[in-house]
Amino acid sequence: MSTPSPDPAPALAAPPGAGGRLGAEGLRPVSEALIRARYLAGLIGYALALIVIAGCVVLWAWLGWWWTVFPALLALILALQSLLLTPRRVRALGYLDREDDLVFASGIMFRSVSTVAFARVQSVEVHEGPIERSLGLATLSVSTASAEADLTIPGLPREEAERLRALLARRGVETMAAL
């Protein structure tokens, strides 16, 4: 007589968003104006790359230094990758404020998802540089007891950054009062 074998364990369902990007499920994107802000912040670098390229071309043309092609190509590649990938990098940023924590995701090739529990928040700051201020953007910085768990969300509309700051401060106080 054979004993009946127990039912096999049910197959685990794939987590939401399992075919897409890690942490992309339900995230709110940062402002598209961050693309323009990053281009404006990079203007000095683009100008320096252009000067290096022009100087290398002049040295090659006047002195015949063919090897100056390599620094010119390096400067061109660095400037082009910044110009071409900045929109994609900004669109890969997202955040979500949930019931008990704040989630932030970033990265294209190497995706990173960070979560900070409201109970761990020690301070929340809103920063605006001159370029961000002119575009109506702000950066939210969340500090915790652990330096590795700190969180910075760039490119938020100023009102959204203030809303998140107030939310994090209020929920942090509520959590501490409950203890």
Image (cartoon, rainbow, N blue to C red):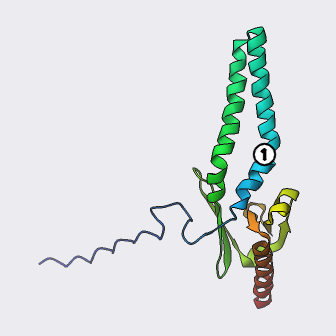
Q: Position of residue 75 (x, y in %)?
A: 72, 31
Identify the residue at horizontal 71%, vertical 25% (top origin).
72
Residue pushed farthest bottom?
A: 178
Q: Classify residue 7 by image quadrant.
A: bottom left
Q: Position of residue 100 (x, y in %)?
A: 67, 80
Q: Classify residue 14 by image quadrant.
A: bottom left
Identify the residue at horizontal 68%, vertical 22% (top origin).
70
Quadrant that contains the C terminus: bottom right
Q: Position of residue 24 (x, y in %)?
A: 56, 65
Q: What's the amino acid at mark 1?
A: Gly
Relative placement, left or right, of 106 versus 132 is left
Q: Position of residue 9 (x, y in %)?
A: 33, 74
Label 1 belongs to which residue? Answer: 42
> Which of the pair 15/78 is nearer the observer?
78
Q: Label 1 neighbourhood size at 10 Å, few (<14), some (14-19), many (20+)?
A: some
Q: Is residue 122 above or below residue 64?
A: below
